[in-house]
Each structure stands twice: as structure tokens, then as C-alpha cells.
Image (spheres, rainbow, N blue to C red):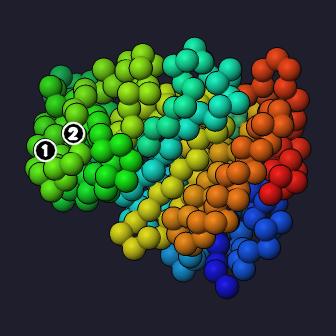
Amino acid sequence: MKKIAVLAGDGIGPEIMAQALKVLTAMKLPFEYEEALVGGAAYAAFGHPLPKEVVELAKRSDAVLFGAVGDFKYDTLPRHLRPEQAILGLRKALGLFVNLRPAVCFPELTAASSLKPELVSGLDILLVRELTGDVYFGQPRGKRISPDGAEEGFDTMRYAVPEVERIAHVAFKAAMGRNKHLVSVDKANVLETSQVWRDTMIRVSKEYPEVTLEHMYVDNAAMQLVKAPKKIDVMVTGNLFGDILSDEAAMLTGSIGMLASAALNEIGQGLFEPSHGSAPDIAGMNIANPLAQILSAAMMLRYSLGMEEEAVRIENAVKTVLAQGYRTGDIWSEGCKKVSCSEMGDAVVAAL
Ligand SMILES: NC(=O)C1=CN([C@@H]2O[C@H](COP(=O)(O)OP(=O)(O)OC[C@H]3O[C@@H](n4cnc5c(N)ncnc54)[C@H](O)[C@@H]3O)[C@@H](O)[C@H]2O)C=CC1
Ligand SMILES: CC(C)CC(=O)C(=O)O
Ligand SMILES: [Mg+2]
């Protein structure tokens, strides 16, 4: 019996998680689910966004299915108590340095994309984001008084060569299994951290002579993603740039509510979550798109549990409901059937 830690979190987290669990339960998989509070919900109940019992639960589970955390009402808390520390803390505690964010535009959703259909039809980008380094984790950070007496905030952007090497190998291997073209995104024209990133990518590329390595500055990458996204196959980048570019890539697929993700460590343990946040603006309304959460459950079956066939079964069910015309509000277009979050979950179960 595999153990799955279920951490729904805040905002729309519990609504979309309920749909993913509905799908997994309908498949009668040999799983034991253990739910726990994280984020704002855990702070409200226990005074901490990531109680140590939750870290222990995540560590002893075969996989973690995560919803989303965050609520603007907690924005004034000291940083270490804010809901977002739950997801950052889990990534660090489990060593989840790989973040796979596939941006795939299903043919039925080309009309929902913010770009012209011909630019996105057939789009299939794999964004490989480094997840435990960079300015999100660099020390020192904090507030201080500058030499001229002004209060200032500061963070440290940093990457050590071994951190870049291990994500580079993941990206090159992914490129080997796809079109053998890897775009590495940095800001090496300005940042020393990015120069280390670029030099390391070039060195590692020698071990993958079949892969063409292309470097792109992040500002240009942001532009190319909306100018000619289909020219990109696998894109590798650091934590900060990957966070931003994956939200941009999400919109090419129709909605951020479509973008699943897998966060993996060296030993194949994983945390699976939609790429979006807790969407407080639509929380509690049963209108959120649960497909990114459901597709994250499929990634969990594939990457952490070795259940490729079952993963494909979920992905095919999602394709079926889209072909049947079911759409939540974020991906709705003329002529389609608008459904709620829970109705979308029901439709996926029916299509399994
Ligand atoms: N991994 C995580 O848990 C993440 C948490 N956050 C947190 O989430 C909170 C809200 O952040 P925002 O910047 O507003 O980002 P967000 O991703 O939560 O929402 C951005 C926009 O996308 C929409 N949206 C997001 N997911 C959707 C879905 N499944 N279906 C339909 N529409 C959807 C929202 O309604 C909103 O208009 C903040 O506290 C933030 O820190 C943000 C990103 C990741
Ligand atoms: C809330 C942040 C910690 C993370 C984020 O935006 C993301 O991973 O996409
Ligand atoms: Mg983000």
C-alpha cells in the first residue's frame, strides 16, 4: 500500500484537491491517503504554516499531493510565518531541486489561449526549473540600514556549480528524450550568478553532444515565449526566472488552471502541485479549474509511483472532457458547456 500525503492548503486548494482525490479514488488505486493542514490553514490552527509533523509526514510518504497556499490576509505576518513558507519549506526539506512544468496546449483549448491559435496549436514545452536555490533561498537576506541611512531590503542571488550541474543533467536528459534542443535561460550579461549558470551549462553540454544548447537572456525568453513559443522544446532555468516564465507559459495553454507540476529529488520522491497559487479571488465559489491539480495527480503516478498506464488514463480522461466541450470559466469559449469545479471533477471521473 503506497502512502500519499494530501496537503490541500488554502484558498481554492481544498476545492481542486477534492476533485483530484475523487479521480484517484474512482480508480481504486492501492493508496492510503493522509491529509494534513499546511499554509494559512496550519497557521490558523497551530500557529505555524509548516508544522514539523507535516514535514515528517511528507518524508515518510511515497508522494505528496499538494494544493496551494497563501492568502493576502497573512501578508503582514513576519515572513517565516507566512503561508508560502509551507511550500518553500517542503521543497527544501525534501531536497526537491527539480521542477518539471509541462506547458501543453490541448487542441480544444487553442481558442482559450491569449495568443492566436496558429501560434499555440500543438504547443508542447517542458520547462525545467531549479527549485531549491537562487534568490528564493540565498543567505543573507533581510532588512538593514544602508550607509546613507535609508532602510533597505536585500536578498542574495546565488548558485553553486554542483547545484547547476545536477539540474543541467536533468534538463539534458529530458532534451535527449524529446527534440534534442535545450534552451537555457539566464541573465549572464548582468549577473555573476547567471555567468556561473551559463558556464556550467556549457561544460555539462559536452556530455550530451547530440543536444543543441541555446542560451537566451531572460528578457528575450519572455518575449520569445509569446512571439514563437513552438520553437521552444525544453527550457531550463533558475528558480526565480522559472517561476515567472512558467506563469507566462501557462497562459499559452489557455489558463494557469491547466499547468501541472512535479517537484522531484535525487531519490525520486516527489511533490505534485498545480503551478498556480491559492487564487483567493475565486476561493469558495466552486468555479476554479481543477485540471492542473488532476494532471498533477497523473504526474505523481508517473514520476513517483511508477504507474505510467494509470497516469495516461487520467490524461486521456482530461482530453475526453475537453473534447466533450466541458470548460470551467477560465477556459470557456463560445459554444462550450460551462461547468463548476466539482462538475469538472465529475466529468473526468465519468471519462476515466
Ligand atoms: N505553490 C503555491 O502554493 C503558490 C502560492 N501562491 C500564493 O497564492 C496567493 C495568490 O497569488 P496570485 O498571485 O493571485 O496567484 P494565483 O495563481 O493564485 O492567481 C492568479 C490568477 O489566476 C487565477 N487562477 C489561479 N488558479 C486558477 C484555477 N485553478 N482556476 C481558475 N483560475 C485560477 C486566479 O483567480 C487569479 O486571477 C498568494 O498568497 C501567493 O503567494 C502563488 C503561487 C504559488
Ligand atoms: C509562492 C511561491 C513560493 C512559489 C511560486 O510562485 C511557484 O512555485 O510557482
Ligand atoms: Mg509561481
Asked if one can make out residue 22 in the rendered structure from this viewpoint, the answer is yes
Q: Position of residue 271 (x, y in %)?
A: 53, 61
Secondary structure under tag 1 reads helix
Pointer 1 residue? 202
Badge 1 amino acid: Ile
Pointer 2 residue? 213
Under 8 Å from ligand 2: the CB of mark 1?
no
What is the CA distance from the residue labelled 1 to the residue labelled 2? 8 Å
- Residue at 60%, 18% in the rendered image: 117
- Residue at 65%, 31% in the rendered image: 107
Q: Quadrant of residue 95?
A: bottom left
Q: Position of residue 335 (x, y in %)?
A: 86, 20
Secondary structure under tag 2 reads strand
**Residue contact at pointers 1 and 2, CB within 8 angstroms:** yes
Front position in the image: 72 or 57 = 57
Q: Earlier in the sequence, mark 1 or mark 2?
A: 1
In the image, 259: left or right of 321? left
Q: Quadrant of residue 207?
A: bottom left
